[in-house]
Amino acid sequence: MQLDRLKGALFGSAIGDALGGTTEFMSEEQIKKDYGTVDEIIGGGKWHLEAGETTDDIFMMLSVARGIVANPIEPVQKIADQFLHWLNSEPKNVGLTVHCSLAYFKHGEPLERAAKMAHDDIGTENVGNGSLMRTLPVSLAYRNYSKMIEVSNAQSEITHPEQLASEACALYNSVVYDMLEKNLALKEALVHRLTGTRYERSLSEEPGELPGGCVLKTFHWVTYVLMKETNFSSVVETLANKGENANATAAIAGGLSGLETGYSGLPGKFTDKILIHEELDSMSSDLFNIRAGN
């Protein structure tokens, strides 16, 4: 049962990303004009995706997972190495903050210094969502809460040294923890973890800003849609049709909704389209085995 949920989380994130990849950087109005409503995985978009192809969001998520599998006790260096391996593969898209941090690391700067140098280059006005969109495997792998938060913060700080980014990752992973370890429903876990935080208002109020690449805007929209919608399809489709940073918002929300739904409950019209099906299936088992052993 728990393996089905872990698999649902990884596939849910990939489905959200594949749906939102079509509409990334588009406005709601342009989406309606060009597609009507996006409720199938069709590819295309800015990155000319093949139907079922995923973006940098999922490849970075898998990099985190591979790093944890390679060394569950001290995974940070392995995660960073996986990021570099991915960057060297010349992916279609790499976020600005991630690219800048990894470029410094690639050229010999220590991890912590590389992220801070990128931070100084880019500025702090809008803290990106790049570490939030990849953080899910941390809470799928670790049952010990302190260890989970330690790795959550560390993986975020590889590219995003800002406290705002680490905080969002920790809150997100804490929601997963409550769902898996305390058997809370998704909405209950969101209320439990976000009440009293900067994201509390989004438990009941639609965010006033568009769902762009800033981690604040992203997590506000993810929270609002997860609280408002009642099933997996409506969660990922709603965020995909919002456009802007649609692949990230739909992937982040899809991970949580997929965890609650479980792989067996996800629509076949989505799961059958995902091109990296075998890798996600295998990684689900690897993370489950790590979780069972700690």
Image (cartoon, rainbow, N blue to C red):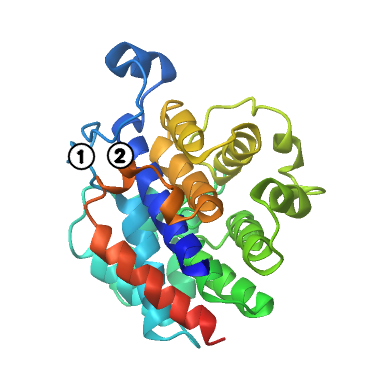
Q: Quadrant of residue 282?
A: bottom left
Image x and y of residue 272, in percent: 26, 47
Q: Tell me the quarter of the image containing the C terminus.
A: bottom right
Q: Residue furthest right?
A: 196
* Residue under label 2: 269
Q: Quadrant of residue 263?
A: bottom left
Distance from disc 2 to disc 1, alpha carbons, whole Å, reads 12 Å
Helix, strand or loop at label 2? It is helix
Image x and y of residue 5, in percent: 50, 61
Label 2: few (<14), some (14–19) or many (≥20) C-alpha neighbours in 10 Å:
few
Q: Is residue 234 visible?
A: yes
Label 1: few (<14), some (14–19) or many (≥20) C-alpha neighbours in 10 Å:
some
Q: Is residue 110 visible?
A: no
Helix, strand or loop at label 1? It is loop
Image x and y of residue 83, in percent: 33, 68
Image position of 28 with respect to 130: above or below: above
Q: Nearer the viewer, mark 2 or mark 1?
A: 2
Residue 187 left/right relative to 40: right
Image position of 82 with respect to 56: above or below: below
Residue drawn at 59 percent across, 27 percent down: 209
| Mark 2 in CB contact with mark 1 (< 8 angstroms) | no
* Residue under label 1: 51
Residue drawn at 50 percent across, 88 percent down: 73
Residue 80 left/right relative to 128: left
Image x and y of residue 173, in percent: 60, 62
Residue 7 left/right relative to 293: left
Which residue type carries mark 2? Lys
